[in-house]
Image (cartoon, rainbow, N blue to C red):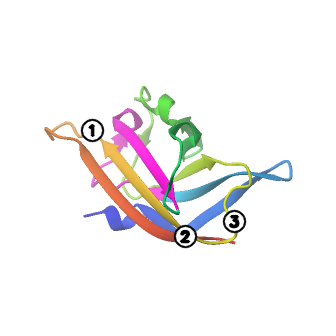
Amino acid sequence: MFEKYMIVENDAENIIENGKVTAFKFGARLPYYRGIALSLVEDIVIKVDGEDVPRETIKFSAHGNTYTLKEMETETEDRWNMGEVAYITVEKEGGLPKGEHKVFMLLNMRIAYLPFPSIRKSEKTVAIA
């Protein structure tokens, strides 16, 4: 239902540190009608232009806090709220080339009242300027 809002189309860029492109990031929204504690995010899977992104290169940032996916597993105090744009950062030397790229995102969440995992998927084209 909310999957169409997961990837923010006009919110992607390379990250430059000390004059070098070290990563890229894109905006993402929670595809759920309530906010959740970060520990309830079981997994985030990213593919760019059909290629899998290694899990250990993915970071999640919201409201000034940044976590690896491993750190999110035990983060019970911080939340990802409905409608809030978080940033998914992928550490990748050189980032992404300028132009359009297909970004796929799978979000696996634990929802207390569901007896099965809540897995949501989205794919959109984003542009790197």
Side of 95 where 65 appears, left or right: left
Magenta stretch? 28-48
Q: Which amino acid does label 2 sit on?
A: Val
* SS at circle 2: strand
Q: Which mark is residue 110?
A: 1
- Mark nearest the camera among 3 and 2 is 3
Q: Earlier in the sequence, mark 1 or mark 3?
A: 3
Q: Pointer 2: what residue?
A: 126
Q: Which of marks 2 and 1 is nearer the N terminus?
A: 1
The answer to whether residue 37 is magenta is: yes
Side of 129 where 76 appears, left or right: left
When the figure is inspected, residue 117 is found, relative to residue 9, above or below; the finding is: above
The span from disc 1 to disc 3 (Cα, nearest Å) is: 35 Å
Side of 5 where 17 appears, left or right: right
Q: Residue 20 location, x and y as percent?
A: 82, 52
Which residue is found at the position 48% from the left and 55% from the top?
47
Q: Pointer 3: what residue?
A: 97
User: Which picture quadrant has residue 75?
Assistant: top left
The span from disc 2 to disc 1 (Cα, nearest Å) is: 28 Å
Q: Which amino acid does label 3 sit on?
A: Pro
- Mark nearest the camera among 2 and 1 is 2
Which residue is found at the position 24% from the left and 46% from the top?
118
* Of 89 and 94, the residue lying toward us: 94
* Of 82 and 111, the residue lying toward us: 111
When the figure is inspected, residue 111 is found, relative to residue 71, above or below; the finding is: below
User: Which picture quadrant has residue 11?
Assistant: bottom right
Q: Which amino acid does label 1 sit on?
A: Arg
Are circles 2 and 1 on residues that touch, CB within 8 Å?
no
Are circles 1 and 3 on residues that touch, CB within 8 Å?
no
The span from disc 3 to disc 2 (Cα, nearest Å) is: 12 Å
